[in-house]
Structure formats: structure tokens, C-alpha cells
């Protein structure tokens, strides 16, 4: 019997590791190829073109996204419930967020509460039941990667991740969300 070359073994190992890495995301339909299926809240399926305008699936360079329109006096969110397959020692949250050119969050202090639904920030990832939060500043007209790691989540099979936007004007678009161990 002929032995496998080290190159073939290395390639096989790398392909196996890459496929495992792709399966680590606890979120389903994270590429939005099935529209907003499995996502709840105020978001809608859309396609965003490279110039930052909405388009259709057939437009060159358009990517599937979840669209969340800001509203006056109320925070908005899109969320997904997920189950962890184990009790991880940490959870890593990551998402790419695009704020429309007209994005402007509310400047009314009463729209924000430090212990309420939305602190005074442009965007927030929130995870329950631990109540982990990661806030971020957005740049209108640019993709911003928001990520954070919760290093000691309590033992829970059922979790929820929220992507939240403040009261205000404009639209944010979400792509490539992930929650990994």
C-alpha cells in the first residue's frame, strides 16, 4: 500500500479545519441567503450595493443584509435565539454594520438610559441571559466591524443575541453576524 504524501495530508487537514471553523457559528442563516428567516425583531431582508444604496440580488456586488430603520423615540433591534452545543468558556460576538449616510442618532437624553434598553451609543450587541453588552461608534457610509468576547458565560443552553440601534434617523445594515465559542 502506498503512503500519502505530506502535502496531501496537510491539504486535507487544512480543509478539515476550515470546514470545522465554518460550523462553529451558533447562529443560523447568518449569510441571510434565506432572507430574514430565523431572525426576529425590526429587521427586514435587503440587498446592499457597494455604493451604499439598496438594490436587488442581481445587482453587481450586492450583498444580502438585514436592514433596520431607526425611529424617533424608540430603540430598534434584530435578534436570534440560539443554542450552544456545549458550555463554552467564552463566546465571541462579531458583526459588520453599515450606517446610511443620513444616520443620526437622537440627541434627546430621555431616549437613553444607562439601565434601560439602549445606552447612549450608535450600536450595541447584547446577549442574554448573561446580559453581556458591546457598544460601538458607527461611521456613516462605512462598514464597521463590531466584536467582543464574553469570557465567563453562565451555563445555559438557550441564549439570545440582539443587534440594537438607538432612536434617530437613517438605516443600519447588518451582515456576517457570528457567535462562536
Image (cartoon, rainbow, N blue to C red):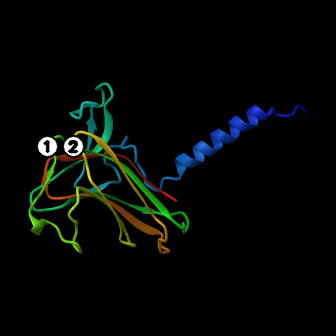
Position in image of residue 31 (x %, y %) = 39, 43
Give the secondary structure at mark 1.
loop
Q: Residue at x 11, y 57 (%)?
A: 106
Left or right placement of residue 127 versus residue 83 in this view = left
Position in image of residue 52 (x %, y %) = 23, 35
Position in image of residue 77 (x %, y %) = 25, 58
Q: Quadrant of residue 109?
A: bottom left
Compared with residue 60, is residue 97 higher up or lower down, i.e. above or below? below
Closer to the camera in the image, 99 or 179: 99
- Give yes or no for contact between labels 1 and 2 (Cβ–Cβ under 8 Å): yes
Left or right placement of residue 152 versus residue 7 in this view = left
Tell me the distance, in whole angstroms, between the alpha carbons under discs 1 and 2. 7 Å
Q: Residue at x 65, y 40 (%)?
A: 14
Compared with residue 120, is residue 36 higher up or lower down, i.e. above or below? above
Q: Residue at x 43, y 54 (%)?
A: 27
Closer to the camera in the image, 128 or 28: 128
Give the secondary structure at mark 2.
loop
Position in image of residue 165 (x %, y %) = 22, 56
Mark with earlier residue (1, 2)? 1
The residue tagged 2 is 140
Compared with residue 141, is residue 159 higher up or lower down, i.e. above or below? below
- In what quadrant of the picture does the N terminus appear? top right
The residue tagged 1 is 102
Amino acid at each position: 500500500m502506498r503512503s500519502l504524501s505530506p502535502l496531501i495530508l496537510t491539504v486535507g487537514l487544512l480543509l478539515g479545519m476550515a470546514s470545522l471553523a465554518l460550523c462553529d457559528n451558533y447562529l443560523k442563516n447568518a449569510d441571510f441567503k434565506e432572507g430574514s428567516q430565523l431572525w426576529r425583531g425590526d429587521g427586514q431582508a435587503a440587498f446592499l450595493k457597494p455604493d451604499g444604496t439598496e438594490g436587488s440580488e442581481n445587482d453587481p456586488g450586492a450583498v444580502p443584509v438585514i436592514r433596520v430603520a431607526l425611529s424617533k423615540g424608540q430603540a430598534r433591534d434584530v435578534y436570534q435565539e440560539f443554542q450552544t452545543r456545549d458550555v463554552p468558556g467564552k463566546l465571541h460576538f462579531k458583526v459588520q454594520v453599515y450606517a446610511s449616510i443620513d444616520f443620526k442618532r437622537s440627541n434627546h437624553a430621555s431616549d437613553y438610559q444607562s439601565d434601560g434598553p439602549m445606552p447612549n451609543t450608535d450600536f450595541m450587541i447584547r446577549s442574554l441571559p448573561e446580559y453581556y453588552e458591546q457598544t460601538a461608534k458607527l461611521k456613516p457610509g462605512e462598514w464597521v466591524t463590531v466584536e467582543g468576547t464574553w469570557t465567563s458565560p453562565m451555563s445555559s443552553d438557550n441564549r439570545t443575541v440582539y443587534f440594537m440601534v438607538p432612536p434617530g434617523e437613517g438605516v443600519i445594515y447588518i451582515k456576517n453576524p457570528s457567535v462562536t465559542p
